[in-house]
């Protein structure tokens, strides 16, 4: 169901806007609209231009809250503390904590930068720890050049075979791992360029080792490790200091955040307000949508305030924006609103299909997945997840589990065992029905198609109601899902019933009269609409194209009626396949011998319950969207999003 909405406008002195928000709007839900856009016909309107003075402090408070590792929302007691803290105290708290945290953060960033540099140096020095030679002595060489670097392992082996013995160079192998061989080589300065080129041809990658260390490479690594350990300890202490600052001021910080959030959001209301100047005073104008009962209560309350004027529109036609949609359904059906939002929120004057999808989804799922044991598992599991995690999908699974349990009793199936319960109705896999002109068919297939026909007819009726509510005459009367389509499809069903019951003569008469007329109405729906709207041109100019296009659209429509009806065969097919899959599980478990392997039974039930449950859920959702919703539902509305009560607090309280 959809809540009735009212559009209200609130006007008062410009300097009084904060009081109105804190004293009145904080207790109601209102979706504010841009007053300049809504009141285009009003002259001398100007935007409410003021810079938010709390924006920076609110940003700092939000950043600190994230540092604290908490969400931005607060519970009731925290909001109360936020109301008790004055604005100057909140600003001072945030600034003081931000400066303290920033000082520590700068220390941490500096330590992190130095750590990164030291670790990079260590990575360069570590492969050469086996070189027992002091670094600073290498840097004093005049006639000898040295090169640190590494070979890819396969090229080093090739280098050893082909070139090492023939080069005027001393090669010292320092370290070897799975991918590289690290070396240092020495070469006379006079031929260093030539030797460097030869090494490069074997993919030698030169590494530039830092020259600010004394002692051997192993001593350099030890020195680096000591510095890294000291910096890590310093970084850890800084992190602990920051946490301590935030933890010691947790309550004050959250109270300050709540206070600043309220002020900042209240101030941002001005972006949606308009100003108008009258005589010597400037007035603000706020407007938006409210649930009817809230709008009536607010206007009654504002009538006693001599500084404020509140006007409520009785006709939505006088408002430029379309009313938003606020869904209100019984608690049992609220989880199914998830499917509605996935498809699209209903327009304000459109029917809300939540209850319809709640009933049809659960029943069709239960029909396709009828098993007492597995149904109870779905019910209990879904209920547990909903209670603990508040997941809408879990509540839907629980509802489907109830219907699966009911159909399990009707089919006489408990965890795949067919000999424990006598079916209250039939066994899906074996029960057959003989139909005139058709022959023997599985009963659940016939029932599934019958259910589909009833659902399609119901969807057509809902489309007619939607068309009347939204004043869409073409959709209500001349569309394939309107009155014309309903008469045609209903006639088809009537003819089938008459033929099945042996009344062929009345069926022939009904076929001749009721088939042709609705099809002609659907074919000429555009000219009929033009005639109903009293337009000067009834038929289109290109009559040949009109008839060709109309013929193919009519042919496609007839095919869609047939295919949409047969689409519900899957309901019966899955009921049969579920029974067949459990039969296979029982056979693998050796249940026929009277002593089943219970591990196989449990595992098989889990697999079938998980896999087929997922498939059935998707198939039912497909039926809902493509065979039901597509006939009457548009989902073009916009959801009611009130300006948050959390942000509209008592902002003029010091």
Image (cartoon, rainbow, N blue to C red):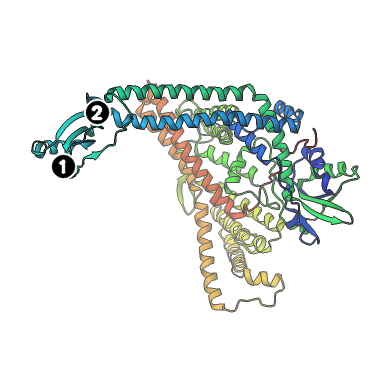
Which mark, by number, is residue 332? none
What SS does tag 2 mark? helix
300 with respect to 72 (left or right): right
Residue at screen point 67% across, 72% down: 530
Mark 1 touching mark 2, by CB under 8 A? no
Q: Distance between the residues labelled 1 and 2?
A: 20 Å
Tell me: residue 527, above or below residue 314: below
Pick the front one: 641 or 314:
641
Marker count (numbered)? 2
| Residue 370: x %, y % from top left | 51, 35
Pick the front one: 423 or 387:
387
What SS does tag 1 mark? helix
518 with respect to 305 (left or right): left
Q: In which quarter of the image is the N terminus?
A: top right
Q: Is residue 645 visible?
A: no
Residue at screen point 68% across, 26% down: 252
Report the residue that reaches farthest toward the left: 166
| Residue 385: x %, y % from top left | 56, 29
| Residue 130: x %, y % from top left | 22, 24
Pick the front one: 194 or 411:
194
Residue position marked by numbered label 1 in the rendering: 190
Q: Is residue 47 visible?
A: yes
Which mark, by number, is residue 137? 2
What crowding class fits label 2: few (fewer than 14 Cα within 10 Å), some (14-19), or many (20 or more)?
few
């Amino acid at each position: 169901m959809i809540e009735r909405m009212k559009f209200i406008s609130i006007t008062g002195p410009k300097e009084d806007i904060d009081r109105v928000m804190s004293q009145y709007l904080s207790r109601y839900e209102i979706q504010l609209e841009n007053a300049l856009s809504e009141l285009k016909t009003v002259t001398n309107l100007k935007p409410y231009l003021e810079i938010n003075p709390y924006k920076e402090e609110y940003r700092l408070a939000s950043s600190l809250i994230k540092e604290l590792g908490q969400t931005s929302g607060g519970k009731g007691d925290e909001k109360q503390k936020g109301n008790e803290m004055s604005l100057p105290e909140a600003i001072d708290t945030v600034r003081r904590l931000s400066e303290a945290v920033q000082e520590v953060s700068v220390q941490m960033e500096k330590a992190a930068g130095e750590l990164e540099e030291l670790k990079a140096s260590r990575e360069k020095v570590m492969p050469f720890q086996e070189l027992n030679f002091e670094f600073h002595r290498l840097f004093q060489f005049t006639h000898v050049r040295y090169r640190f670097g590494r070979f890819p392992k396969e090229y080093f082996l090739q280098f050893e075979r082909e070139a090492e013995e023939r080069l005027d160079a001393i090669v010292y192998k320092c370290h070897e791992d799975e991918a590289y061989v690290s070396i240092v080589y020495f070469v006379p300065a006079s031929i260093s360029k030539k030797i460097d080129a030869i090494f490069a041809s074997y993919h030698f990658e030169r590494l530039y080792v830092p020259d600010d260390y004394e002692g051997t490479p192993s001593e350099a690594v030890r020195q680096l490790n000591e510095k890294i350990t000291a910096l890590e300890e310093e970084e850890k202490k800084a992190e602990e200091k920051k946490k301590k600052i935030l933890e010691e001021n947790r309550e004050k910080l959250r109270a300050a955040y709540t206070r600043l959030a309220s002020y900042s959001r209240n101030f941002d209301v001005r972006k949606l307000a308009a100003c108008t100047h009258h005589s010597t005073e400037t007035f603000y104008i706020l407007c938006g949508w409210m649930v009817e009962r809230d709008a009536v209560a607010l206007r009654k309350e504002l009538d006693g305030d001599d500084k404020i004027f509140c006007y409520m529109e009785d006709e939505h036609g006088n408002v430029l924006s379309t009313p938003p949609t606020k869904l209100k359904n019984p608690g049992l059906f609220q989880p199914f609103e998830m499917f509605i939002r996935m498809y699209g929120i209903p327009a304000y004057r459109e029917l809300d299909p939540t209850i319809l999808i709640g009933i049809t989804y659960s029943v069709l799922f239960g029909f396709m997945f009828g098993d007492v044991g597995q149904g109870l598992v779905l019910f209990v599991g879904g209920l547990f997840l909903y209670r603990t995690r508040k997941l809408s999908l879990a509540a839907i699974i629980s509802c489907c589990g109830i219907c699966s349990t009911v159909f399990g009793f009707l089919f006489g199936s408990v965890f795949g065992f067919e000999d424990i319960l006598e079916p209250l109705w039939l066994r899906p896999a074996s029960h057959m029905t003989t139909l005139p002109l058709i022959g023997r068919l599985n009963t659940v297939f016939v029932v599934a198609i019958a259910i589909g026909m009833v659902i399609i007819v119901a969807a057509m009726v809902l489309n007619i109601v939607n068309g009347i509510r939204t004043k869409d005459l073409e959709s209500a009367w001349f569309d394939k899902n309107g009155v014309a389509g309903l008469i045609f499809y209903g006639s088809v069903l009537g003819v089938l019933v008459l033929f099945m019951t042996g009344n062929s003569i009345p069926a022939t008469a009904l076929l001749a009269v009721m088939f042709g007329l609705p099809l002609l109405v659907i074919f000429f729906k555009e000219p009929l609409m033009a005639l109903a709207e009293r337009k000067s041109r009834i038929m289109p100019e290109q009559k040949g194209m009109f008839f060709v296009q109309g013929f193919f659209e009519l042919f496609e429509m007839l095919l869609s009626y047939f295919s949409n009806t047969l689409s519900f065969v899957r309901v019966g097919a899955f009921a049969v396949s579920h029974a067949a899959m459990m039969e296979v599980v029982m056979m693998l478990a050796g249940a026929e011998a009277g002593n089943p392997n219970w591990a196989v039974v449990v595992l098989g039930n889990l697999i079938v319950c998980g896999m087929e449950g997922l498939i059935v859920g998707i198939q039912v959702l497909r039926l809902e969207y493509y065979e039901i919703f597509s006939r009457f539902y548009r989902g073009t509305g916009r959801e009611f999003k009130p300006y948050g009560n959390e942000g509209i607090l008592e902002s003029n309280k010091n």
